[in-house]
Amino acid sequence: MSATTAGTGRSRRRSRGAVESSTSARTWGKTALLAVIFLWCLFPFFWLIMTSFKVQGALNSANLFDGPFGLANYRNVFNQDFHLNLRNSLVIATMTTILCVVIGSLAAYAIARLPLKRKILLLTGVLAVSLFPPVALVPPLYELWRTLGLLNTYEGLYIPYTSFTLPLTIFILTTFFAAIPKELEEAAKMDGASPFKTFYRVILPLAAPGVFAAAIIIFVSAWNEFLLANTFAPRDPEVAQTVPVAISLFTGAVDFQRPIGSITAACVVVTIPMIIVALAFQKRIIAGLTAGSLKG
Amino acid sequence: MAEVATESRTLSGPGPGGRRPRTKGVSEKGLGRLFVTPAIGLMVLVALFPVIYAFVVSLRAYTGRQYEGFAGFENYSEALNDDKFWASLQFTFTFTVISVGAEFIIGLGFALLMNQAFRGRGITRAAILVPWVIPTVIAAQMWFFMFNVNPGFINSALGLGEFNWLGESGWVKFAVIFADVWKTAPFVALLLLAGLQTIPTDVYESARVDGANAWQRFWHITLPLLRPAIFVALLFRTIEALRVYDLPQVMTGGAFDTESLSMVVQQYVVKTPDPGLGSALSTITFTIILGIGVIFVSLLGRELVIGRKDQ
């Protein structure tokens, strides 16, 4: 389109028809290439769903449309206490999200708006923590948790998750707080509102979309965490074993052979709600992800 | 602005009436300190303190979990003489370089496409979130079964018969890296797309008027202006790739030289407990990854400063 406006008058008139047909061909070409991205992202998931419904001999066939199909795999999954794993993951991810959002939004507001000494040092520290490899915490925290009796507990997982996700939370929320017009706070200040009142009556409601985006991202990362979960609560769905750990450990009738049916069914159970959340809040998640990283 | 200001007045207005300005509540300075304290406290207690504690533990000798006394740097020399450590270091670096490189190229391609296309852009942007939101453990199981001989989906799609991807030392690495690229290239695309959208379109218009072709526009305009976003994406991906644990752990369990640094450290904590050696390995891993991160950040800092001078 812009190509037609760019040329000189005469060449524009001469080439207009050709340009238009080539742009429409190009648009279709680009749409076709977009379909490649689309398939890249979604096809493996389609494979997962089809496989999860296959039963008996069908599981040994590479052809996705080979039957018989049924719900046996899903029944198996819930016979292995998978609902308890779902409960554990839900509690741990929710606690992480609440703690991170509360602690993170206070810190982010202070960094974005309040007079603070050594702000640069503080941000460098936050950045350093975001570069920490979680595995560096595994041996020392294991010893500490063993002494404190926090192995195989919810606390033993959501406390380290919170401290690991805080840097990202602070980066995302600082960007959002910084984008709120300063005039609003000044007006509130003029009216005699205390700084704290300004924060929770004026700023926090305006930052709600950003806080929400951060909350989803925190929830997803806590829900997906595997290293600490697999180390601090490796067994027992009754206590604190999370979904990823359970999915990595599913056992079948025969030892040393992974039960493809139960595993794919469990994967579908976990993935569908997450995909729905991702699609429903697509714009906010993308805003949050890019804010958090471009700031960093 | 006037409208916004009145709105904020009504927001802060309804509190218990008639206060004089700046007499109630904590001062801004005090509030600032109060607000950052929980965050700093938690990060110091659950991130900084354990790392220091790990260093202390790494200087002690243990048999099983039994404390045996001060060991000096013995654990470190044992770790550095351990073939397993070097093998895992090599795998981790190979994994990082190849997967981050591939993710960057594919992600950039995706981002450029999505930035240009009009039809179907919204739905593709939504689809791109799917690999990101899927837990890595699930992606690992999924690709394990796709690459596996039974049911042999990839083999039958490529007509390879009974090729054992997960049983050949080179190809198993390919499978692990492929799964990682599948999961994170879309995420890289998302970050780069955000960067592309900050480039003003009139720069391209004038380049086009000057007769620059598509490749020249990409090389001389897109890439330089995209540099900050590229750096950020590479930093995040490199650090994450160096920490890799979930994919090789679930896909191969470390077989055929696919044990990552994180897997080796974790093994000395649970499977064959040795807190001293485990802590020494975790301290070494920590130093390597944080070191690479710091180099990246300082390069990024310089990059951003140069970028600002240019403008």
Image (cartoon, coloured by chain):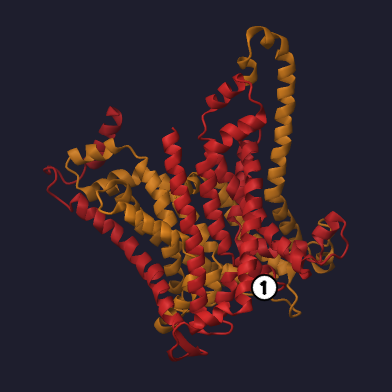
Q: Is residue B288 left or right of residue A259?
A: left
**Does residue A1 appear in the picture of this structure?**
no
Secondary structure of residue under mark 1: loop
The residue drawn where x is 38% and y is 56% is A124
Tell me: A290 left or right of B172: left
Position in image of residue B131 (x %, y %):
63, 53
**Quarter of the image containing the C terminus of chain B?**
top left
**Could you say which is closer to the camera, residue B209 or residue B134?**
B209
The residue located at (28%, 34%) in the rendering is B7
Looking at the image, which residue is at 83% across and 64% down?
Answer: A58
Image quadrant assignment for residue B193? top right
Q: Is residue B158 visible?
A: yes
Q: Amino acid at mark 1?
A: Gly
- The quadrant in which the N terminus of chain B is found is top left
Image vertical order of residue B75 relative to residue B291, above or below: below
Disc 1: CA contacts within 10 A as few (<14), some (14-19) or many (>=20): some
Q: Residue at x 61, y 73 (%)?
A: B86
Residue A192 location (% of width, % of height): 16, 42
In the rendering, what colour is chain B?
red
> Residue A164's x, y, as percent?
44, 63
> Who is closer to the viewer here, B60 or A143?
B60
Q: Nearer the viewer, residue A33 or A10?
A: A10
From the viewer's perspective, is residue B157 above or below residue B44?
A: above
Would you identify the image quadrant in which residue B169 lies? bottom right
- Residue B192 coordinates in the image, percent (x, y): 56, 43
Chain A, chosen colour in render: orange
Q: Chain of mark 1?
A: B
| Residue wearing tag 1 | B254
